[in-house]
Image (spheres, grey):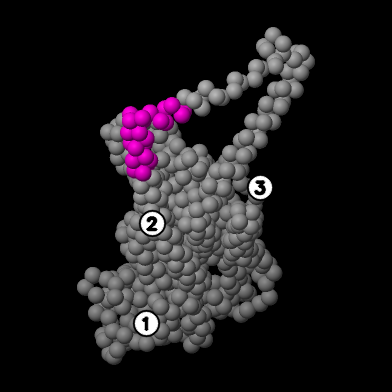
Amino acid sequence: MTQTIAPRVRNLVLLLLAAACALLAGAGPASAHAAVTGSDPGQGAVVQEAPARISLTFSEQVALSDDSLRVLDPDGKRVDTAEPSNVSGTTYAVGLKPGLPDGTYTVAYQVVSADSHPVAGAYTFSIGAPSKTSASVSQQATDDGVVGWLYGTGRYVSYAGFIVMAGGAAFVLACWRRGSGVRPVQRFVVSGWLALTAATLALLLLRGSYTGSGKVADVFDLSLLGQVLETKTGAALVSRLLLLAAAALFISVLFGAYDKREDAQEKRDLTFGLAVGGVVVAAGLAASWAMSEHASVGLQASLSMPVDVIHLLAVAAWLGGLGALLVALYRAPADAPVDAAAVRRFSRVAFGSVLALIATGTYQSWRQLGSWSAFTDTRYGQLLLAKIALVVVLVGVAWISRRWTGRLVEAVSASAEREMARVGAGADASGGTDADASGEDRTGTSTGHDADEQPDPEPDDTEPDEAEPADTEPADAERAAQLARQRAARDTARQKQLRDSDPDRLGLRRSVLAEAGIAVVLLAVTTVLTQTEPGRTEQEAKAAASPSASASADAGASGALTLNMPFDTGGEDGKGIVTVDLDPARVGDNEMHVYVERPNGRAFDIPEVKVDFTLKAKDIGPLPVVPDHLATGHWSANGVQIPMAGDWQVDVTVRTSDIDEVTVSKNAQIG
């Protein structure tokens, strides 16, 4: 039966690994986590005069370099000043050279979002009238290609290494302390440490090229490495390496002094110290992800980061402990098998981890999606649905494992009862024999008689002084070594046969193997998910992009100005789009209308909305305007004075409750 099971197990593992690799390979380039929500001039806009600068508004803050914002003329030559800057909030601008001729210009941007992912793209606008352009902008993002693939693989390996190391150590310390002396379990945990350390070093080297040129040749550029160390992501990776040094000390104690400690009180004290130290180190490692990725940006960052740490620790305790249990079930020696009590303790740990995952995952889903429609309308939501489905399947298989665990406990209990009964019966039989011996001494007489009748052993033919010649000694040594190898092989086969002979243990091994295979795919989906633009951001970008282009075109034709700005205050009913109409958008009196709509286009009221106009080039403003409420989602103000023409910054403050308020901005040419 063992021979038929092994190929099935091997094929199942290979199939699951292939599925994980296919998922990673077919995921495509990692989407940006910061999205362009507005631009001035807008995409496809036609302006009558050359602007002094171009500006882009992102959904979150980004990091700039001298080449982050480039403007190319119709011949493909740069016409910007190569000095991009942050003008306000999440709006960034770069100046243009004076006297630009009419034609179509290309704006290319390449920045790094606040959650560490590169953002790249391009669009065009025209001065005077559209024209042909020879400007060429690469459509391949820096996170695509070989470097991007290597960086994504490094992220997957780092997650897997953390889960194996932290979860495997937790399994030994909390569920099966005898496992600290089992060599396969030791190798399992140490391999997790090695994988996480190697992946972290690789990510540190790849980071500069990943967010810059995307060239393999730049991976070992020390100047880029120096720039990476000054960023938030670089600091997180260095912190992870320092914490891994502490983790190495923890592992050496767990598999060294802890296993050799025999005094019960000393072992309890050491267990407490290892538990506290292990939780601190594991939480610090988890925080190195939380402080540099999704959780550190957006709504309620101060709450989302500790929630993310708890989420990662729960994943490690469940999936890492599952891997350690699988190793123990398949590789532990027959004289020290994983006992039913350890499996039962892990079952309780896994159940608590699943509850923590449900709570933290629900919060993270709300934070990253923001609406039910984002589940199906965004790639992030679709991946999240796939992850939820895998978790449900994994929990179902875990329930089967719990049933096998119950059977294993019952079998062990029954076996213990039978052993006690056998020992008791043996004691009774021994007592009866002694009584008989003290009476008539029949047993002793018989035994002595048998002993007397035993034939003398045959004398040994070969005395030490009559041994074979010396030239046969190497052959004898080789024969002895061969016999030793055969005995070792027989012992190994006997141990394997003992492990496979228990049907309850075999069933548990199969179900745990299935759990581990699903966990491999689940980790792949999670890795891709962390590299995908959140659904909330994607929907905001779509809402801002589709109406703004047409509005900009209308503004150029009619003279009126329409600005669409998504907002999210974070509270209840805190998400929507505010639209500012300024007519005729010139120096002097203007009529302004403000509209507030939900993402689905339905108008709704909010407690307060106000508008400020600022002309930073002339140090004018902010000029406040408080419009009057006319109807549901509609405010208006007459006689809005614009004192001079220029590139005005329009700030709209939206308050949706007593405490939930946000200010969104966009630049516009007025006059």
Among all residues in the image, which is located at the extreme top?
Answer: 465
Q: How many numbered discs?
A: 3
Q: Which residue is mark 3?
A: 217
- The residue wearing badge 1 is 598
Q: Nearer the viewer, mark 3 or mark 2?
A: 2
Q: Which one is in front in this view, the residue at disc 2 or the one at disc 1?
A: 2
Residue sitting at x 45%, y 75%? 375
Q: Assign a secondary structure to mark 2.
A: helix
Q: Position of residue 580 (x, y in %)?
A: 38, 81
Q: Which residue is mark 2?
A: 410
Residue 111 magenta-highlighted:
no
The answer to whether residue 170 is left or right of residue 555 is left
Q: Taken as a whole, is the magenta stretch helix, strand or loop?
A: helix
Q: Is residue 502 left or right of residue 368?
A: right
Under circle 1, the secondary element is loop
Q: Considering depth in this image, is 530 or 159 the residue closer to the camera? A: 159
Describe residue 264's horizontal placement relative to residue 154 as left or right: left
User: Which stretch is magenta?
Assistant: 423-447
Quarter of the rendering occupied by the C terminus: bottom left
CA distance separating discs 3 and 1: 48 Å
Q: What kind of residue is marked 1?
A: Arg
Viewer-nearest residue: 650 or 584: 650
Q: Nearer the viewer, residue 108 or 280?
A: 280
Identity of the residue drawn at 34% across and 37% down: 432
From this view, report whether residue 501 is shown above or below residue 370: above
